[in-house]
Image (cartoon, rainbow, N blue to C red):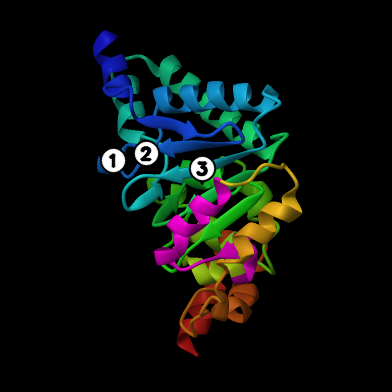
Amino acid sequence: MAMIRHSFDEDVNQVLFEGNSYVKKVILNRPQKLNCLNHHMVSEMTRKLKAYEIDPEVKAVVLKGNGKAFCAGGDVVASYICMVAGHWSYAASSYKKNLFLDYVVATYGKPVVALIHGIVMGSGAGLSMHAAFKIVTENTAFAMPETSIGHFVDVGASYFLSRLPGFLGEYLGLTGTKIRGPDMVACGLATHFVLSKDLHLVESALDEVTSSDTSKISKVISIYEHKPNVKQDGVYSRLEIINKCFSRKTVEEILSSLESEAGN
């Protein structure tokens, strides 16, 4: 069991906690693994977030990831190692803790700002999509790829996917298709779009926040907001055909509709 735990806790610096008295930063720091979440990271984030929530000096929390990804999901490999070693209950506990972390963010008593650059998938989406402010860039790539490994979309995705226009949520959930930053803003998955070169400026500006007033925080972010370029070949531009095919009642009917459209 010690070896299994080591696969989770090989580095105590997998999550960094920084910031000042008013704004706390939670930084995923596992760039070589695209910041995939493991048991240790989830436990530490939950503990710190709960402490920040009851600290009267803390006004807001910023979530970010080091490296080229915000978070590519949960550490499936670590969970697999646990299960094949017979420690399935430990893996199940990790999964439960992960979902509880998403709940903590979704119900947080103070504004949470997610700086979502690069890859954001699975558990990374669960961590960021429940934040009050979701800032994306031209390099952001969102997906819920669980179906590709025989799983189903989780981490509260039934909440944020069901609120997308038309049947886009069904499309993203069933296919695991990637959607880029501009499309995320267009469909409502993200709240703000900034250029990647300006993301550090947004972070620096957020450091100066001294209030939990969401309108003031939004005003700070809007200084660096950029009009997203929604491409004609992007996911959002295909919404009409997505609605036509994914409005069917069963997966079999969806497939039949897609085949019919492909033949036209």
Could you tell me how far apart the alpha carbons at marks 2 and 1 are, in whole angstroms?
Answer: 6 Å
Q: Is residue 154 visible?
A: no
Q: Is residue 203 magenta?
A: yes
Instruction: Answer with left or right where residue 215 lies relative to residue 125.
Output: right
- Across and down, in percent, residue 94 comes to 46, 23
Residue type at tag 1: Lys
> Callout 1: 10 Å neighbours few (<14), some, many (20+)?
some
> Callout 3: 10 Å neighbours few (<14), some, many (20+)?
many
Could you tell me how far apart the alpha carbons at marks 1 and 3 are, in whole angstroms?
Answer: 17 Å
Res. 33 mark? 1
- Which secondary structure, mark 2? loop
Residue with the mark numbered 2: 36
- Across and down, in percent, residue 104 comes to 64, 31
Residue with the mark numbered 3: 63
- Which secondary structure, mark 1? helix
- Across and down, in percent, residue 48 comes to 54, 24
Residue type at tag 2: Cys
Magenta stretch: give its range: 186-207
Between 82 and 142, the one lying in front of the other is: 142
| Point 43% across, 56% down: residue | 200
Res. 222 mark? none
Mark nearer the viewer, 1 or 3: 3
Q: Assess whether mark 1 and mark 2 are in contact (beta carbons under 8 angstroms).
A: yes
Looking at the rendering, in which quadrant would you find the N terminus?
top left
- Which secondary structure, mark 3? strand
Between 240 and 54, the one lying in front of the other is: 54
Q: Assess whether mark 3 and mark 1 are in contact (beta carbons under 8 angstroms).
A: no
Instruction: Please determine whether, in this image, residue 2 is positioned above or below residue 171.
Output: above
| Point 59% across, 35% down: residue | 102
Instruction: Please determine whether, in this image, residue 136 is positioned above or below residue 28.
Output: below
Residue type at tag 3: Leu
